[in-house]
Structures are given as structure tokens and as C-alpha cells.
Image (spheres, coloured by chain):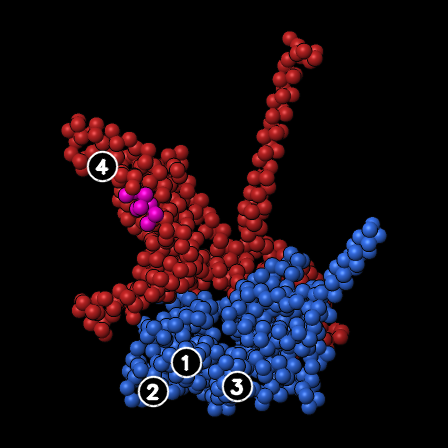
Amino acid sequence: MKSALKSVAIAAAAALFAGSAHAVDLTIVSWGGAYTASQQNAYHNPYMKANPDVKIINDDSAAEGLAKLRAQVESGKVTWDIIDMVAADAIVACDEGLLEPVDADAWLAAAPDGTPASKDFIPGTLTIGGTNCFIPQIVYSTTFGYRTDAFKGKQPSTIADVFDLKTFPGKRALEKKPIANLEWALIADGVPGKDVYKVLATPEGVKRAFAKLDTIKDHVVWWTKGAQPPQLLADGEVVIASAYNGRLFSAIVEKKQPIAMLWDWQAFDLDGWVVPKGAKKMAAIKKYLRFATDTQRLADQAKFISYGPARNSSIAKVGNHAKLGIDMKPHMPTNPKNAKTILIFDYVWWADHRAELDERFNAWLAK
Amino acid sequence: MRTADGVPLKISLQRALVRSRIRALLLVVPLLAFIAIAFVLPIGDMLFRSVDNRIVESILPRTAVAIQDWNPNGTELPDEAVFEALTLDIKAGVKARTLGRVARRLNYEKPGMTSLFRKTGRRTKRVAGPPYKERILKIDNRWSDLNTWRLIRREAGALTSGYFLASVDLKTNDRGEVVWQSEERRIYLTLFYRTLWMSALITVLCLLLGYPVAYLLATLPLRTSNLLMILVLLPFWTSLLVRTTSWIALLQTEGVLNDVLVFTGLISDDGRLQLIHNQFGTFVAMVHILLPFMILPLYSVMKTIPPSLMRAARSLGATPFTAFVRVYMPNTVSGVGAGSIMVFILSIGYYITPALVGGRTGTFISNFIAVHVSETLNWGLAAALGSLLLALVLALYLLYDRLVGIDNMKLG
């Protein structure tokens, strides 16, 4: 009896031990909501199925990711394993030395045809702003949506129309930040897209951009959270709004609101993975990232949300929406039809001028 | 005199006193530790961050020392030794991946430093030996700008006034003089002023609305007043975000209130009122959210005022109005003080509600502190703004103490 108990105890202890020796918890920080759900379906679930010893824990605090990451690294208590960040934040964090550098070809899987990762990701996205800490997942864009019932006859189709209150009267919603708005103001004012940063680099150029924004200032509702502009459009509070393309897709296709897309000069941006400096489970982190950023996985994510994969080899594999069954390709910001004119942020320029222009923008708003 | 065990009574008494004091101290140790960890340390850390400038001398240590010998008022660039120090510092900074930090710090003072340091960092790999000066100058002509070097020399110390200056719209110009920030970049003084006057008005509105409610609560029969109390407390227990977004649904131009006004013909469909995303929206939402903080202290004070006082005043010939103003109201001063200070201080630090309903004219200074903490990562400026806000609140508290007397305050 006694020995039987003993052997049971030993077996139990062994099982416990074995369990704890293999199980790895990965804490992945992302944005929550529909976005985390798309990652759960496209990356986490298949990965955990293939690796039963790994448990992925979602942390929805990406909105405060940069500040919390810095606090963790400064205090030496890094509890996060992987963070989902927008490119601009990743550049700041990488510059501050808060992230592990990424060796793209060593970490990431090659395309099915053998193209190494560094060649397969959209050019420049792995080294955004001259940094090397960022693994892009998706291309998203800040673009415009308008209410289809707001205007009789001609519908807005260009960025100049957004600033044209005479032909298209009504309120606009814009993000409460200078980035993108200043560029759009200049383009609407007649500056060719390729010269935007050349013009913006001069004091007269900045003045010109603000002067253009002045023309619609009294008719703008300024938003700060991505959920606001689709809501403002749906409520009829505004007739044209800048918004993340995925949010507009959801309002138009999933919620059937009377809204249409205006893709002219959509502002491309990237969202991707970064690894905090001093992360403890590097082997497990790298293994997961290799899986989650391969060609098929990035293509799969687009089934669940209308953001474009950041790998060239994934773009062709984008299929149908998981629930609605519609073809997702026409809804991708990277689709050639939508991407006739695109604004690519000059992150290096913004790193120099962000603090200055943020202040100026806010002072302008307060007046 | 001695106790039973032979110890002098005086000593025995003293021992007993010490023991009880230690026991009392042990009882409050958790509280003291909590205060130290949750208040004193973070606030101290914040105050320090607002002047902390060790980043420059820790990442550019050789340059910070070498540049002290250079005359910033002259017309000559620093000599070879400084350039050599800079090259070595930048190489070390690139290796330790810390160069970006110092670049961002200097960029707050002079836009363009981020790209200058990044570019130089990439290219110094090829600068293997002297002449350093010539090679660095070739990388970027901003290194031949005296103002770049003046900036580095000025910020080489361990402490800086840069964050505090920035937080009151001042800056140090290239000649080292403190001047106003250029007109189109001045923002923080406006925001401090706006935060103060709007909070003051919110407090007054809360008082005007809350006083009659508290009076009713305190004087109505228990059954009715309990029901009224629940009506006060229910919103108090409801999530802040829910209450704020409900106001958006009610007040927006296509919202309930505007719909009713249009339906009744008071305004035309084209003339819908802008009631949210501006100062008005902030006032409405904030007064609603902070009202219970005014009502509850008022109520607790009013509850203790015996009804016989008013009856006595009336029987001595006072009109109801005179009795109310000269007898009842002076007795509620402590509640008014407590409620007002509570509402005012809460309001000054609020940021979620103004961010959601304030639009461009109804946001507070705390919104910018939040932006600098979580978005721009300029924690020095956030700390300076926070320290100023703390100083402001303390100053107002002392003023209140002088005018009304803090002992008169009654929270319950």
C-alpha cells in the first residue's frame, strides 16, 4: 500500500515536472478586438495545434505598448515576449535601444519559391526608417470614407474633394495628428505627391499646409481612436472621414453602412512584430515568429481582416473572407486599383520634426 | 517608588510607553510603506525626471568632457580633440544601440538632430583614424554649424532646465538666452490657463446644481430622500466611459437632443447645434461626472444641521430667505469647501472625458501629459508638466487654507 502510494506520487511528480519542463507561455501583446482575433485565427491557433507545448497568452495593451515597453526595459523586468507595433513606434523603440535587432534571413522563413525573407518582404519594410528591429505583418492604410447619401450627383473621388467644401459641403473627420494631414493638405493644394516632403521641409511649405487646413478647420471633427471615424460616418455626424481601411471595410461590408471608400492618396503604414530587449525565451520567440510570418500565415490573416500582407509571395495567396466568402483582394489597400496614388511616410523626416510639428499642430488647433 | 519586581516605577512606566509606541508604529508601518511606495517614490521620481539630463553625458561621455574647453561664444569650431571624442562616443553608442536616445533628447531642443546622429552613426564606421575633424565635417555640414556644438555643450550637464522651459512655452536660443517659443508653437500656457478656468467653472456649476440636490436629500423624508440618493449614486457607480459615450450619443449633431429640437421645429434641419466635440461638450460631461463628488460632502454636512436652527431663526423674525442665507448657508461652508476642492482637483487632472468630447477647444493639459507619456515618449516634458500641475494644485490648496481654513473642511 505504502509503496503503491509512493510510486503514484513519483509518477505524479514526474508528470508535473515533465509538463513544466516543456510548456512555454508566450505573452503576445496586440491591439485586441477584431485585430487580435485575426491573429488568433491565422497564427496562434494553428501554431498551438502544431506545438501543443506552447501556450499563447494575448495581452491587449498594444495601444500603450511603447510606454509600457520602456518601463519594462528600464526596470529590467521584461514580461512581454512579442509586441505588435506600428512602424513609427517601432522606429522610436529601436532608436531607444528597447528592442532586439532582427536578422531577417536567419529568423524568418523563405518564400515557397526559395526567395529569402529579406527579398520577399515589400522592399524597405524590414529596415523601416533605417532601423532593424521590425518584422512587418500587414500593410494598412489611412484613407477616406464618405457617406453615399450625402451628395447628389457627383461623389468625392480625390483628395482635393476632401478639402472642397463648396462642391461637397458637410463636416469632415480627421485624425488629431499632423502626420498625413499636412501631406494631404499640400497634395490637395496642388503639390505633386513625390515633392511633398521637399515642400514640407521648408518653413513656407509648412505654412502652406496649415493654410490649406485652415480652409476646412471649422468643419472638422478630430478623432483620436480608430473606432471613432466609422462611427461618426455611420451616425451621419460627418460626411467624409479619414480612417483605417480595415475599420471602413468592416463598416461597409460587415455592417452594411451607406459608406464608400475614397482611396486617393491613401497613406500606407505598417504594423508588425518586435521583440523587447532582454526577452528571456528567445528560442521560443524565434520559432513562433518564423511560423507566424511565413507566406501562408500572412495570406491567411487577410481572410479575417482587410489588411494587406507585407510579403510579396503572400499577396497572390489572399483568398476569400472567412465568414462572408467574398473575395478579399479588391479590399486590400495594396490592390493596384486602390493603390494608384499612395502616400509613403518619410519616417526619417518625421523623426526629426515630429515634436516640433506636434506642438505647432496643437497650437493651431487651440486657436 | 518601585513596582512589584523591584524596577523603579518611572523606568517601568517609560518602558511601557516605549512598548506601546513601537506597537503603534508597527501598526502603521504598512500604511507608511504604502504611502512611500505608491506616492512619495513615484512623485519624487517624476520631479527628478523633469530635470534629469544624464542621458547626454552618459552616452557622449568623452564629448561632454572635451567640449568644456571650447569657447561657445567664439567663431571657431571645436578642435580635433573634441571631434575625436565625438567619433569615439558615436561609435560606442552605435555598438550599444543607445545613440538614438541622445539624438532624440537633443532633437527636442533642435529639430534635425535625430537624422544628424543617425546619419553620422552609420558613417562613422568608416572613420578609422585621424583627422577626425575633416572626416566628420564631410559626413554632414550640420557639424560645421556652431549652434550644433553650442547645443551639445549646453546640454552636457547632468541637469537641464529644458523640460521646464518647454512646459511654459520658453526655450533657450542658440546664443543661450531664454526666449519665448516661436508664436506658432506656443501651446502649454494656453492649456494650463484653459484647464484652470474650465475646472473653476465646472466647480461652480457643480456647486449650483449640487447644492439644491444635497439640500433636498438632507431635508426630505427618509423614503423619498433614499430614492433620490439612489438616483445620485447610480450614475456614480456607472462606468466613466459609458457615461461619456452616452453624452456623445445624446449631444451629437445627429443625436437625440438635436433630433428633438428639429422635430419640435425649434431649429431647422440645416441649423443643428454643435453641442459636443467642443468646450460645451466638456462642460456638460464633466459636470455630470463630477456632480456626486459635490453632492456627497454637501449632504453629509447638511445632514448634521439641526432643523431647529432654521425654526429658531424664523421665530426670531427672519424671512425664509434671510434665515436660509444667514443661518443655513454659513453652516454648510465646510461642505462647500470640501466639495469644491474635491471637484476642482479631480477636474484639473481629468483626461479621458476631455479627450473624447473636448474636440479641439475642450482638451486639458492632462491630455498632453498622457500624449507625452504614451506616444512621444518624452517623459521629461511629461514630468515637467506634471510637476507644474502638482505645484499649481498645492498653491491653490494653500490659498484655500489661507482664505477659508483647511480645518473647516469636512468630507463626511
Chain for disc number 2: A
Name chain A's colour: blue
Question: Gap between marks 2 and 4, in whole Å?
Answer: 64 Å
Q: Is mark 3 on a helix, strand or loop?
A: loop
Tell me if I can see residue B179 in this picture: no
- Where is residue B288? Give x, y as percent: 34, 54
Question: Gap between marks 3 and 1, in whole Å?
Answer: 16 Å
The amino acid beneath tag 4 is Val
Q: Nearer the viewer, mark 3 or mark 1?
A: 3
Residue beneath the point at 43% across and 47% down:
B393
Question: Gap between marks 4 and 1, in whole Å?
Answer: 60 Å
Asked whether A4 or B201 is in front, the reply is A4
Residue beneath the point at 66% across and 74% down:
A49
- The stretch in magenta equals B224-231
Q: Residue furthest right?
A: A3
The reply to whether label 2 and label 4 mark residues of one chain is no
Quarter of the image where one finds residue A294: bottom right
Q: Which of marks 2 and 1 is in front?
A: 1
- Where is residue B119? Give x, y as percent: 63, 75
Residue A155: mark in rendering? 2
Residue beneath the point at 41% across and 83% down:
A261
The amino acid beneath tag 1 is Ile
Residue bearing the label numbered 1 = A252
Dominant secondary structure of the magenta stretch? helix
Residue bearing the label numbered 3 = A320
The reply to whether label 3 and label 4 mark residues of one chain is no
Tell me if I can see residue B324 in this picture: yes
The amino acid beneath tag 2 is Gln
Instruction: Please rate how many residues cluster around mark 4, counting C-alpha atoms within 10 Å: few if below 14, some from 14 to 19, many from 20.
Output: few
Residue bearing the label numbered 4 = B325
